[in-house]
Image: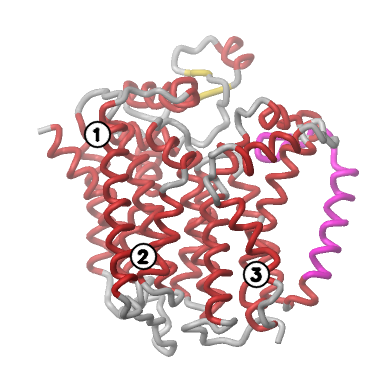
C-alpha cells in the first residue's frame, strides 16, 4: 500500500507539470518528449510545495487527499484547456535535427552513454532509498523543518533564536536559518505523507527525481537547438557523471541540486528564446528563473544575473556591453552609499564585511582544477574560451546573451568568496562546492552551445531571427 501511494504521489507530482509544459513546446520540435518530461517533472517539484503552502494558509491540514486532489485538479485543468491555447508560435517552424548522424560509431556512443546514465540513476536511487538522512544541512536544517511540518500537518512559523526565546510560544520554532525558503522540506513532507509515516530514507527520493529532471532538460534542450542524439547525450552523460553532483544525490539533504536544475532550466530556455523568440520557452525561462527564489536565498542573485543577458538582447551586443560597464560602476556607487544595515536576501553590508580576501584564490584553484569535484569540466571551459574568439561575429552575437547570464552569475560567485565574509566557506572547503554546483549545469550547457557553434562554423540550426545587434 505504501509503495502504491508513493507511486501515485510521483504521478501526481510529474503529470500535471507535463500537461502544462506540453502546451508550451510546439509539436514536432526536436527533443520535445524529453523537454516535456524534464520540465514537467521539475515544475511538479516546485508546484507541489506551493500547493502545500496554500493549504496551510487556508488552514487545511496536509493529507494525501488534500494535496493529491489539488494536484489532480491541476492536471485536469491542463488536460481540458482548449487546444487553441498554446504558447508556441505556429508561424515559426519547430527546430528539427537528425536523430543520429548515420554513423554506427555514433549509435554505439548513444547506447553506451544511455546505459551508463540508466545504471547511474538506478544506483543513486538505491543509495537514497536505503540510506537514512546523512548530509549535514539535511540533519541540521531541512529535515528538522520537514519533521515539524509533517507532525503539525501544516507550515509552522520559524523565527531567529532571540525572538524564539522572547516569545516562548510552543507553536513557534527556531533553526539556524529561519529565513530559508521551505520548498525542499515540503517535498520531504509530501513523500512522507504519501508513505503514511515518517521515513528517513524514502522521503529523499525527490533528489533522485531532480537528478532525472536535470538530465532530461539538458538533453532535451540540446536536441531542441539542433544537436543530434550523439552530440546531445555525450555532454549529458558528462554532466550527470560529475563526482560532486552524484555525491549530492547519494547523500541527499542539500538544496543545491534543486537550485542547479532550476537555474539550468531557466538558462537553457532563455537561450532557446533568444534564437527563435518562442513564447513557450520565454514562459519556461521566467517561471524557473523566479523559482530560484523558492529554493535558497542566493536564488535572488541568480535571478538578477538574467538582467545583463536581457540588456544585450534589447540594446545589441555593442551598446549592451557599454551599458553593462556603466551599470557596474553604478552598482559600486550604490554599495558605497547603501546603509550598512539594509538586508537583501538575508545579507547586509554589515554582515558580509565587504573587503578583498586574496586567500580564497588558493581554495578556488584547488577545488576547480586539482580536486576531482568537477572532473574535467573546468579544463574544458578554459579550453573553449580562446576557441570562442575564432567564432564569426554572428555566432558570437548568438551566444553573447546567454554567456552574459552565466558569466554574471559566475562573477557573483567569485565576489561571494573573494569579497565577503563567506570566504571562510572557500578557505575551509565547506560551502564553495555546494554553491558552485548551483551554476555548474548552466556552465556545462553554455560550454556545449559554444562547442556546437564551433562544430558548425558559426551556423546555428533552427535560428529564425537575426543575431541581436546586427
Name the foreground residue: 368 vs 94: 368
Please tell me in which quadrant of the rendered image residue 369 appears.
Answer: top right
Total number of numbered discs in the rendering = 3
Q: Position of residue 273 (x, y in %)?
A: 52, 73
Tell me, yes or no, if residue 61 can be seen here: no
Please tell me in which quadrant of the rendered image residue 133 appears.
Answer: top left
N-terminal label among 1 and 3: 1
Q: In this view, does 322 lie to the left or right of 246?
A: right
Mark 1 to mark 3 CA distance (whole Å): 44 Å
Q: Is residue 214 left or right of residue 454?
A: left
Rendered-image quadrant of the N terminus: top left
Magenta-drawn stretch, dominant element (helix, strand or loop): helix
Query: Which segment did they paint magenta?
Result: 321-347
Mark 1 packing: few (<14 Cα in 10 Å), some, or many (20+)?
A: some
For mark 1, what is the residue? 63
For mark 2, what is the residue? 35
Tell me, yes or no, if residue 45 can be seen here: yes
Q: Residue furthest front?
A: 105
Q: Which of marks 1 and 3 is in front?
A: 3
Please tell me in which quadrant of the rendered image residue 122 appears.
Answer: top left
Q: Position of residue 98 (x, y in %)?
A: 35, 80
**Magenta stretch encompasses residue 340:** yes
Question: Residue 401 — which label?
Answer: 3
Q: Which residue is at a point 53% across and 18% down the rendered structure image?
A: 174
On screen, residue 83 above or below 347: below
Secondary structure beneath disc 3?
A: helix
Secondary structure beneath disc 1?
A: loop
Mark 3 to mark 2 CA distance (whole Å): 22 Å
Mark 2 packing: few (<14 Cα in 10 Å), some, or many (20+)?
A: many
Q: In this view, does 449 lie to the left or right of 301?
A: left
Amino acid at each position: 500500500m505504501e509503495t502504491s501511494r508513493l507511486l501515485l504521489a510521483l504521478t501526481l507530482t510529474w503529470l500535471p507539470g507535463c500537461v502544462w509544459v506540453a502546451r508550451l513546446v510546439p509539436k514536432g520540435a526536436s527533443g520535445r518528449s524529453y523537454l516535456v518530461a524534464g520540465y514537467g517533472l521539475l515544475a511538479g517539484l516546485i508546484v507541489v510545495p506551493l500547493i502545500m503552502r496554500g493549504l496551510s494558509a487556508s488552514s487545511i491540514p496536509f493529507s494525501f487527499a488534500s494535496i493529491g486532489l489539488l494536484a489532480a485538479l491541476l492536471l485536469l485543468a491542463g488536460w481540458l484547456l482548449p487546444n487553441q491555447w498554446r504558447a508556441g508560435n505556429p508561424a515559426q517552424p519547430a527546430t528539427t535535427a537528425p536523430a543520429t548522424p548515420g554513423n554506427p560509431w555514433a549509435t554505439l556512443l548513444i547506447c553506451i552513454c544511455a546505459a551508463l546514465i540508466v545504471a547511474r540513476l538506478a544506483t543513486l536511487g538505491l543509495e537514497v532509498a536505503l540510506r537514512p538522512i546523512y548530509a549535514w544541512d539535511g540533519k541540521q536544517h531541512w529535515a528538522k523543518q520537514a519533521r515539524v511540518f509533517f507532525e503539525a500537518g501544516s507550515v509552522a512559523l520559524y523565527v531567529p533564536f532571540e525572538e524564539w526565546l522572547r516569545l516562548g510560544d510552543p507553536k513557534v520554532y527556531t533553526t539556524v536559518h529561519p529565513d530559508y525558503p521551505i520548498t525542499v522540506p515540503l517535498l520531504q513532507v509530501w513523500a512522507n505523507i504519501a508513505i503514511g509515516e515518517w521515513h528517513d530514507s524514502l522521503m529523499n527520493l525527490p533528489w533522485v527525481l531532480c537528478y532525472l529532471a536535470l538530465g532530461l532538460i539538458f538533453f532535451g534542450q540540446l536536441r531542441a537547438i539542433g544537436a543530434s542524439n550523439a552530440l546531445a547525450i555525450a555532454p549529458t552523460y558528462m554532466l550527470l557523471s560529475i563526482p560532486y553532483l552524484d555525491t549530492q544525490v547519494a547523500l541527499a539533504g542539500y538544496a543545491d541540486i534543486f537550485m542547479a536544475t532550476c537555474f539550468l532550466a531557466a538558462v537553457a530556455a532563455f537561450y532557446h528564446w533568444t534564437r527563435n523568440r518562442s513564447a513557450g520557452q520565454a514562459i519556461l525561462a521566467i517561471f524557473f528563473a523566479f523559482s530560484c527564489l523558492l529554493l535558497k536565498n542566493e536564488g535572488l542573485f541568480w535571478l538578477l544575473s538574467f538582467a545583463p543577458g536581457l540588456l544585450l538582447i534589447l540594446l545589441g551586443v555593442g551598446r549592451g556591453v557599454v551599458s553593462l560597464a556603466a551599470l557596474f560602476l553604478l552598482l559600486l556607487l550604490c554599495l558605497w552609499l547603501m546603509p550598512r544595515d539594509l538586508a537583501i536576501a538575508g545579507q547586509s553590508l554589515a554582515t558580509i564585511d565587504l573587503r578583498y580576501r586574496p586567500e580564497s584564490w588558493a581554495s578556488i584553484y584547488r577545488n576547480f582544477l586539482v580536486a576531482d569535484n568537477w572532473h574535467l569540466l573546468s579544463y574544458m571551459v578554459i579550453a573553449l574560451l580562446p576557441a570562442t574568439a575564432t567564432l564569426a561575429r554572428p555566432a558570437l552575437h548568438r551566444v553573447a546573451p546567454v554567456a552574459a547570464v552565466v558569466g554574471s552569475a559566475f562573477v557573483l560567485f567569485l565576489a561571494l568568496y573573494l569579497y565577503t565574509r563567506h570566504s571562510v566557506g572557500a578557505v575551509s572547503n565547506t560551502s564553495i562546492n555546494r554553491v558552485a554546483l548551483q551554476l555548474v549545469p548552466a556552465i556545462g550547457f553554455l560550454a556545449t552551445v559554444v562547442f556546437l557553434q564551433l562544430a558548425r562554423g558559426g551556423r546555428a540550426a533552427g535560428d529564425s531571427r537575426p543575431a541581436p545587434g546586427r
